[in-house]
Amino acid sequence: MAFIDDFAPTHLRLTEVSPTLWLVTFDNPPVNVIGPDMMRDLKELLTELESNDTVNVVVFASADPDFYLAHYDLSADHAVTEALPSPTGYAAWVDITVRISKLSAVTISAVRGIARGAGSEFVLATDIRFASREKAILGQMEIGFGAVPGGGAAGRLPALVGRGRAFEILLGGGDYDGDTAERYGYVNRSIPDEEFVAFVHDYAERVSRWDHRALAEIKSFINKYTRLPDSEYPLHSDAFWSAVPTPGFQQVTKGLFERGLQQKSDIEYRLGTDIADVVANPSAATD
């Protein structure tokens, strides 16, 4: 049986647009957090793609136009996540981001909605990033927890946006809309939302026609000159997880959940702005 017929993910959907073009749609209500089940789905998909020489392009989209990938699931059992298979031997999220960046297939993030934290890191690990001008929001808010991004944002952003803007993004912890993200190089292009789906499809379909070997060789050369060695990325993960047990991280996390984190709440829509208020007043009463 073909993989696409046998694959039974729980937090994403896989559609064969054509034999050379696959569409992955994240679907984990209410806000598409990245938890153990989604990570299990992604690891299984990556294992297939690593040995597949037919699929030329994989587009990653979201079923929710407001939330692409909100962030890592902060309520998840870390032990369950780390028990998932890891062909690289790295921590669970690093395993995914390293492997996706090395696929022979071209990977495209179709960012329509919010992609913060690990959601932004997933986007950064893909080859090409297109953003909806009106709907996309990207950001790395880990500084508000007193942590570094664990999935390699500090290693991937400088090659895209430059040293100064990487500092701005990671030290400010704020949100970047589609047009600003395009101007900075955080994404390739910002497209009006009404044109977004058609634009991404047309580009992906065009690239999917090319020779698989040629695509893989182009990717290999670009990766050679722009990617850090794989061994660098576990250092980011280790630094993040060392921050998780600290009182500051735990206090901010508790304050965020009290305000509705991981629900369709004001805090999720405005996290890039409001996390600073939570850091200042972690136990403040909510309205």
Image (tube, grey):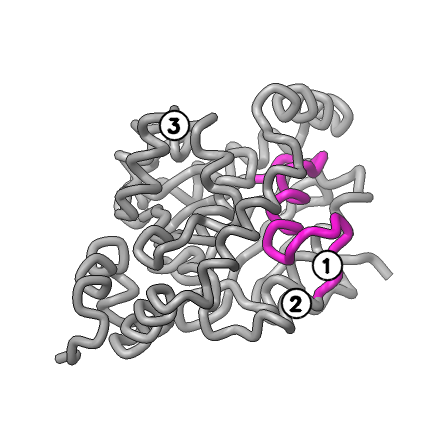
**Residue 218 spot, x, y in % from top left:** 67, 21
Q: Is residue 113 visible?
A: no
Q: Which quadrant is the C terminus positioned in?
A: bottom left
Amino acid type, residue under disc 3 in the picture: Val
- Magenta span: 84-107
- The 10 Å Cα crowd at callout 3, few under 14, some 14 to 19, many 20 or more, is some
Closer to the N terminus: mark 3 or mark 1? 1
**Chain-order first, disc 2 or disc 3:** 2
Q: Which residue is mark 2?
A: 9
Question: Whole-Å distance between the Cαs marked 2 and 3?
Answer: 34 Å
Q: Which mark is residue 161?
A: 3
* Tag 1: amino acid: Glu
Queried whether the magenta region covers residue 88, the answer comes back as yes
Disc 1: which residue: 44
Q: Where's residue 163, x and y in %?
A: 38, 26
Front residue of 77/199: it is 77
As drawn, 11 above or below 217: below
Q: Which three-letter amino acid code belongs to the residue tagged 2?
A: Pro
